[in-house]
Amino acid sequence: MSISFLGLDHIQLAAPDGCEKQAREFFHDLLGWPEIPKPKALRKRGGVWFQCGSHQVHIGVQQDFVPAAKAHPAFEVKGLDELCDRLRSHDVDVIEDGARAEEGARRFYAADPFGNRLEFLVWTEH
């Protein structure tokens, strides 16, 4: 087969109309992700884009928005404990997941301001 996948370019999380201020406060101010200018042709749709390591996270407006409570992106983090403490200090609920530690990772879950599930993890073994 001549097809090969190189990895992820970006992920998109849905959010309600008017989400931009809250998205910036959470993803830029709290998580520290730089905002990326959206292409001019897409700006009228609303939403906001961020850089997360070598990937992008696009927050897109969905008119009939329902948060993703199960499906989620997982972000590998250096400084997982510090991030956990930072989120908690900003009243973000953090759910630690020790049940799967045998996989060689430590992880926790939190929701973005719109209720979308996010996973944050660090590999302790590879």
Image: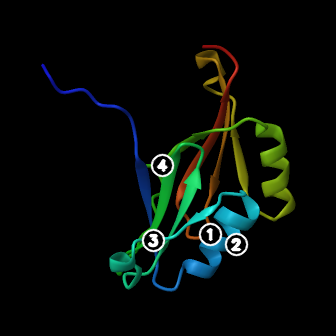
* Residue at which label 1 appears: 113
Q: Note whether residue 113 is visible.
A: yes
| Type of the residue with mark 3 | Lys
Closer to viewer: mark 3 or mark 2: 3
The residue singled out by tag 3 in the image is: 38
Residue shown at the point (46%, 50%) measured from the top left: 70
Q: Position of residue 42 (x, y in %)?
A: 35, 76
> Sequence order check: which comes first, mark 1 or mark 2?
2
Q: In the image, which disc is placed on residue 25? A: 2
Q: Which mark is residue 80?
A: none
Decide which of tag 1 and tag 3 comes sooner along the chain: 3
Residues under numbered marks 1 and 2 in contact, where contact means CB atoms less than 8 Å apart: yes
- Rounded to the nearest angstrom, the CA distance separating label 4 from label 3 is 23 Å
Q: Secondary structure at mark 2?
A: helix
Residue in the picture at 54% in, 54% down: 117
Q: Nearer the viewer, residue 14 or 8?
A: 8
Residue type marked 2: Glu
From the viewer's perspective, is residue 14 above or below residue 84? below
Q: Pointer 4: what residue? A: 72
Quadrant of image for the N terminus: top left
